[in-house]
Image: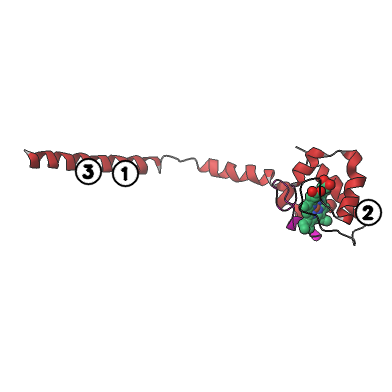
Amino acid sequence: MKAQLINTAMILSVLAINLSCSDKSGTTPIPVPEPSTEQAPSQPVSAAEPAVAPNTSGNPSLTLIERADCLACHKIDAKLIGPSYQDVAAKYTEKDIDQLAQKIIDGGKGNWGDIPMTPHEGLSKDDAQQMVKYILSLKK
Ligand code: HEC
């Protein structure tokens, strides 16, 4: 009797394994949607355009930011050492361009925390303003 029970249990578990296997192998071929893999990249690519397209975009303001050291501390959409540019854009408006440009040149801390931004003394006010305008354009 006992042996039979064990056998049944074994058969059942073998069945269960088979079932779960066939479940998996059943779902693997079914996701036929190769078209969805064609669609998927096209979405992230367009979403990431500000971050990825810089050199090809021909956006001079973004090129300025790329050539400077900004991206060592700032990301477009995530806090790094400094705030994300989208957060900066959300906090300020056009009328802050001058003040922000000066802040980039002078460096400083206090608006986002205790970590200071390094000064960028070599940067012209014009270029700094260009950068700020670009950053503000990232407003969501
Ligand atoms: C060493 C890291 C570092 C570098 C390099 C850096 N930043 Fe920053 N940035 C910061 C930090 C930290 C803050 C937050 C300062 C604060 O709390 O007031 C900041 C803040 C800012 C702000 C918002 C200022 C404010 O008062 O709210 C702007 C705009 C900005 N950075 C732009 C730039 C640009 C453009 C460059 C490149 C020229 C640059 N940053 C390079 C670290 C950096």
For the point 85% across and 55% down, the residue is 107
Q: Are marks 1 and 3 in contact (CB under 8 Å)?
A: no
Q: Which residue is mark 1?
A: 21
Q: How many marks are shown on the rendered structure?
A: 3
Q: Residue 129, percent across and down?
A: 90, 49
Please identify the residue farthest to the bottom as the structure is shown.
122
Callout 1 secondary element: helix
Task: Identify the disc placed on residue 125.
Answer: 2
Judged by its main secondary structure, the magenta piece is: loop
Above or below residue 16? Residue 54 is: below
| Quarter of the picture holding the N terminus | top left
Q: Nearer the viewer, residue 24 or 8?
A: 8
Residue 72 part of the magenta-drawn span: yes
Q: Which residues are magenta?
A: 65-83
Disc 1 residue type? Answer: Cys
Residue 82 part of the magenta-drawn span: yes
Q: Which residue is mark 3?
A: 14
